[in-house]
Image (cartoon, rainbow, N blue to C red):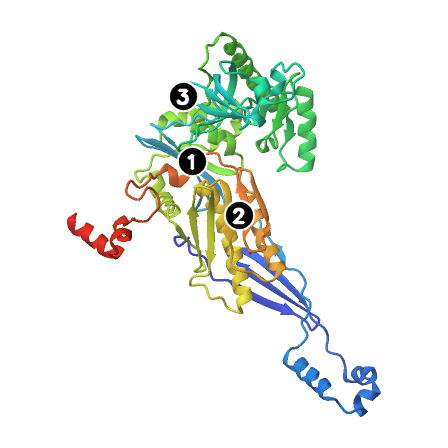
Amino acid sequence: MGLFKKKAPRVIRKGDGNQVSEVRTVNGETVVVRKATQPQPAATTTKTKRKPQQKRKPKQNGQKQAQKRSRQKPQQRRRPPIEIVEPPETARKQMLVRKSPHQTQIVVLEGPVLVEHYVAKSDRKSLVGNVYLGKVRNVLPGMEAAFIDFGEGKNGVLYAGDVNYSEFDLNGKPKRIENALKAGDPVLVQVVKDAMGHKGARLTNQISLAGRYLVLAPDESVRGISRRLPDDERRRLRESVGELRPEGTGIIVRTAAEGATRDDIKGDIDRLKATWDKIDEDRKAANAPQLIYQEPPLVIRVIREHFTKDFRRLLIDDNEIHSQVMEYLAGTEADLVEKVNMYTDELALFERYHVEDQLRKALDRKVWLPSGGHLVIDRTEALTVIDVNTGRFVGTTNLEETVLQNNLESAEEIARQLRLRDIGGIIVIDFIDMEDKRHQDAVLLRLREHLAKDKTRTQVFDVSHLGLVEMTRKNVSAGLLESFSEICPRCSGRGVLLHEEAAATGIPAHDHGAKESADD
């Protein structure tokens, strides 16, 4: 971003007659390109390998033309693949919490750069994680879904794939939603995605309770362990969890469990099991629709999911929230309590760390890159499109290297923008065209490496025949833009002003626009 301008790329060339290595340092990243060159043969070797008849035989016209073409277009040398060397992580992370009369904001900084943002508005509370005893309104076999009244205004939708069929008596019938649910039946559901626009909340019958280190599920078949953990840590945690797991329950081990002791794991399991026992007890006495279990506030959920030992500190500018966080961490991970501090400076917290400026830029359609290139991010009903442009970046060597450097830088920034803006669903990226397959692989590698920092599940596909990169990111929340915007009442979100009179009268649209301005 323009606020934190980085140094221009620095190129170092070194090598001998048989090998040349190019080490490029671009925005703190090192790209090593090794090129093997063919040694020049000695004059004696050339004479001994040359056929005698080539000297004496006169050249024909076809031979002359071939020789001429060979001089004009030298033989292409085979290039080895590019090696991308990632530097160690040096950015120090910190979390900031700001409370205002209308909302609570939580941001994550890596060094001075804003990478994540969460907001809880006073008039629009998230229902994700809440457990309800709902009532089935209708079942649609053709849609393989059911609409559930769970007491929050608009009905939620429960798809067939989110039903725990082991809870229902199917009498030998196939596992289909119409065989498990009937209109009027009570059903225990959990919100997995808030209502967005005209769509109701997404529900699941496969209940799961998230803790600090684990996720507990009443379904025994649900088991797993985070792939982000090292192999030796996975083995250790698998043994501990296997011994402590309550009978008849499933457990998923989270990344935050790295380094957790056996007592830590046991304490988390006990808390989650007690919560589930209370849910199971309350559902029996409840009348549908009714709230059975409510997730803690957003601040606690974000700290539970993201705040680990990797963070430098957590700054909070509100006394009440500070007390809640201290109480939660004291009961779950006391080692992190010392990293929580109250912010009491006169200068506003977000102003002190330049968060407001970065948030303002994150709401723009265009994102400038440090080198001078830029991204254009457009959101549609079906998908999000990201266009990569070189802009003012002209490079230093040749077009191929310029495109590669720009795309590598763009891949890193795209990964950050997806986290910051919380963009979900289908995403199509139009990188600058790269003819070299090795360059395409290098850009995809850079994109996947930086997406690995994202807690939200992503999937990146190879470059298509049209030169596009398609990817998906789990859609959980409304996103940054939707949180601070509303549909324009004049253009209905299209971004254009329609002049219907121009089609009927033949008068140019700009004349109608001038007339409307004069009337105003």
Q: Is residue 85 above or below residue 317?
A: below
Dots 2, 3 in contact, CB < 8 A:
no
Q: Residue furthest top?
A: 285
Looking at the image, the residue that sits furthest to the front is 504
Q: At label 3, which amino acid type do we have?
A: Glu
**Residue at point 57% right, 32% down?**
256
Q: Is residue 302 above or below residue 359?
A: above
Residue topped by disc 1? 478
Residue identifier under label 2: 90
Q: Earlier in the sequence, mark 2 or mark 1?
A: 2
Asked whether residue 267 appears in the rendered view, the answer is: no
Q: Position of residue 475 (x, y in %)?
A: 49, 36
State the CA–CA distance, disc 3 to disc 1: 18 Å
Q: Amino acid at mark 2?
A: Thr
Q: Which residue is mark 3?
A: 152
Tell me where residue 91 appears, x and y as whole percent.
50, 46
Which quadrant of the view contains residue 65? Answer: bottom right
The label nearer to you, 2 versus 3, is: 3
